[in-house]
Image: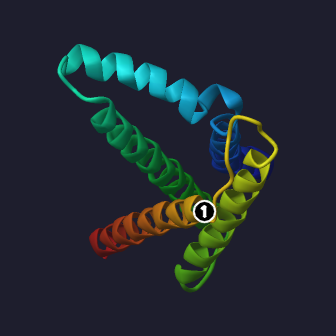
Amino acid sequence: MNKTEHIIKNWLPVVLWICCIFLLSTESFSAENTSRILERLLRFLIPHITAREIGTIHIFVRKAAHVTEYCIASLLLFHSFRNTIQFQRYWWWVLYSLVIVIFVAATDEYHQAFVISRTSSVVDVGIDIVGGILGQGISITLYRLRRTREK
């Protein structure tokens, strides 16, 4: 595999995932639209659920989605840096991954400020960063386990 193919193989998943994150920030995935889907599902599963309970679950699902999206992005970034940039210490891959996660999270929230049915929130950036940190924790653990097995 030549160098270009190697770079594309390692970075295309990152680019596609970040595009997915920005797609999820569009009007199609606004709270109003996702609440309709979740409410139908919850009313089917739990017929006597209250509107307040549905609202609470909806908020939890949306915030968990933030953590999940950015955890996956963080995992992909660490993997891509590890496979394309050689450092003496893996902490550089962690640092670069988190910087990109923070940049994408801030840019994503800025983008949402221009979508009528969305709101932009610094709290969401914080939640996204938590997802990025979680992803790096997983990445470090897997990296260390792999290194231990190789020795």
According to the picture, the residue beneath numbered tag 1 turns out to be 125
- Relative placement, left or right, of 59 versus 30 is left
Tag 1: residue type?
Val
Seen at 47% across and 69% down, the residue is 133
Whole-percent x and y of residue 44?
25, 14
- Relative placement, left or right, of 21 versus 139 is right
Residue 99: which quarter of the image?
bottom right
- Relative placement, left or right, of 104 versus 60 is right
Seen at 60% across and 70% down, the residue is 98
Residue 8: which quarter of the image?
top right
| Residue 40 in the image: above or below residue 80 | above
Whole-percent x and y of residue 108?
71, 52
- Relative placement, left or right, of 149 versus 90 is left
Q: Is the image coloured rainbow, by chain, by secondary structure, or in one colour?
A: rainbow
Query: How dense is the environment of label 1, judged by Cα within 10 Å: few (below 14), some, or many (20 and up)?
Result: many
Whole-percent x and y of residue 123?
56, 64
In what quadrant of the picture does the N terminus appear? top right
Where disc 1 sits, the SS reads helix
| Residue 86 in the image: above or below residue 20 | below
In what quadrant of the picture does the C terminus appear? bottom left
- For this orientation, the residue located farthest to the bottom is 88
Foreground pick, 98 / 128: 128
Number of numbered discs: 1
Foreground pick, 104 / 109: 109
